[in-house]
Image (tube, rainbow, N blue to C red):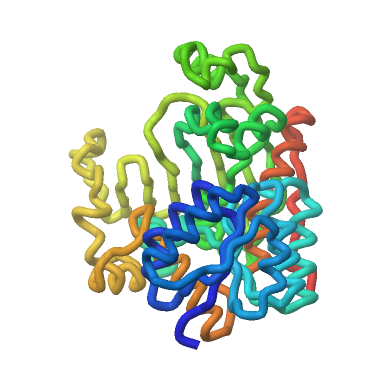
């Protein structure tokens, strides 16, 4: 197999941004079928495929028709948080290698269903967390695996992204976030920040997350933004009761004694950051400031002046500590969105389907990372009490 004949289910913002230009330009992928609830999205993507490849793709608004096709080698599930696990399970039941786009689980049972389905069917599965392939995340992991930060004691991550316009235009954009922000209060998008941290801390590979506690701030950011835009579609939400807190902080204890801190911050004005931080006994990396610190760099004379260290990850250390995958990627030429990590995660998936072997991000990873959403919901509702995190690797 040189190209994976691929079906895409879910043609919203994520699906559309990936299909053109990324997926249609990849050497190991051919999009042969697409599906979305909305016919206009199906028609748009089918026309793009025809324009780019000269071939007609199958299109439907019923995902079950996709899963019944005999001419596909893999399916990519890019639907809403409410439906993506259910559809991924049905795809695996149909024996179709499955790539699942990210998002939190809707309830804990979904995580169990995902793992049990993959264990039962043995269908190839990969969780498509692109941030695990970010340049600085992989650079930090490369340093950690060499032991140069010493023993890792704490990691931080965040999804800090001003989504006020996207949420409040949810009806217009047909985006699922709006209803979630009205009805839920949780760490609703944990895997961007947690995925790279889990890999660095060897979660599910000798270490595991034991329990979490979550706390939510009040919800005022979306209402304030709506009041500032009274003459737009957002303005009608000025007095809407949003359940989702503006800032949700989740702390996690690991079995090896390391701790993790996550933050969801999407309802107030701010620049984008994932606040990726790895702190060891002999050094650290921090995204905000983009700096690497080693004990050997310590200089008593400049102890209180840290500005020369800012952005040294790129200026000083990249040549030495870039991950081998990124060194090759940079030499070959960057491709794909989000700084190239979209290409890397999808290239890994298609090569996995072609060559077999071990999933780069397996179903146990998916369940462990996605379960943070329903568990944070419980913790917040019950006064930030500690909530146990299941060990999904016990399901064999």
Q: Is residue 56 visible?
A: yes
Q: Quadrant of the C terminus?
A: bottom right
Indicate the position of residue 296 as horizontal and vertical percent values: 27, 56
Indicate the position of residue 71 as horizontal and vertical percent values: 61, 80
Residue that appears at 66% across and 67% down: 66
Is 213 on the left-hand or right-hand side of 192? Answer: right
Residue that appears at 37% across and 51% down: 285
Is 81 on the left-hand or right-hand side of 326? Answer: right
Q: Is residue 361 visible?
A: no
Q: Quadrant of residue 334?
A: bottom left
Indicate the position of residue 365 as horizontal and vertical percent values: 63, 63
Q: Quadrant of residue 134?
A: bottom left
Residue that appears at 46% across and 36% down: 161
Is 266 on the left-hand or right-hand side of 84? Answer: left
Foreground of the two, 166 or 242: 166
Would you place residue 255 above or below residue 221 in this image?
below
Residue that appears at 22% across and 65% down: 319
Would you place residue 383 above or below residue 387 in this image?
above
Foreground of the two, 5 or 269: 5
């Amino acid at each position: 197999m040189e190209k994976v004949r691929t079906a895409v289910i879910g043609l919203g913002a994520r699906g559309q941004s990936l299909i053109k230009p990324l997926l249609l330009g990849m050497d190991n992928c051919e999009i042969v079928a697409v599906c979305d609830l909305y016919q206009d999205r199906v028609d748009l993507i089918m026309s793009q495929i025809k324009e780019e490849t000269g071939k007609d793709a199958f299109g439907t608004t019923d995902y079950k028709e996709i899963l019944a096709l005999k001419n596909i080698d893999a399916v990519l599930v890019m639907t809403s948080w409410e439906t993506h696990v259910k559809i991924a399970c049905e795809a695996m039941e149909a024996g179709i290698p499955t790539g699942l786009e990210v998002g939190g689980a809707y309830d804990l049972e979904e995580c169990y269903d995902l793992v049990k389905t993959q264990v039962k069917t043995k269908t190839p599965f990969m969780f498509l967390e692109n941030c695990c392939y970010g340049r600085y995340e992989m650079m930090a992991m490369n340093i950690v695996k060499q032991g140069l930060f010493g023993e890792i004691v704490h990691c931080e991550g965040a999804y800090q992204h001003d989504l006020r316009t996207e949420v409040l235009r949810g009806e217009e954009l047909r985006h699922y976030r709006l209803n979630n922000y009205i009805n839920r209060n949780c760490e609703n998008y944990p895997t961007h920040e947690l995925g790279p941290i889990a890999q660095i801390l060897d979660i599910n590979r000798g270490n595991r997350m034991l329990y979490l506690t979550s706390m939510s701030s009040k919800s005022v950011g979306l209402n304030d933004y709506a009041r500032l835009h009274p003459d737009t579609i957002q303005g009608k939400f000025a007095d809407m009761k949003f359940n989702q807190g503006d800032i949700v902080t989740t702390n996690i204890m690991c079995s090896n004694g390391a701790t993790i801190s996550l933050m969801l911050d999407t309802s107030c004005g701010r620049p984008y950051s994932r606040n990726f931080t790895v702190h060891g006994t002999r050094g650290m990396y921090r995204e905000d400031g983009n700096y690497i610190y080693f004990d050997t760099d310590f200089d008593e004379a400049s102890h209180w002046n840290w500005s020369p260290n800012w952005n040294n990850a790129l200026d000083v250390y990249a040549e030495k500590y870039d991950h081998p995958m990124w060194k090759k990627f940079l030499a070959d030429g960057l491709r794909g969105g989000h700084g190239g990590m979209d290409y890397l995660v999808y290239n890994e998936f298609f090569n996995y389907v072609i060559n077999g072997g071990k999933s780069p991000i397996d179903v146990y990873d998916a369940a462990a990372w996605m379960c943070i959403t329903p568990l944070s919901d419980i913790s917040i509702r019950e006064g930030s009490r500690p909530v146990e995190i299941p060990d999904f690797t016990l399901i064999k």
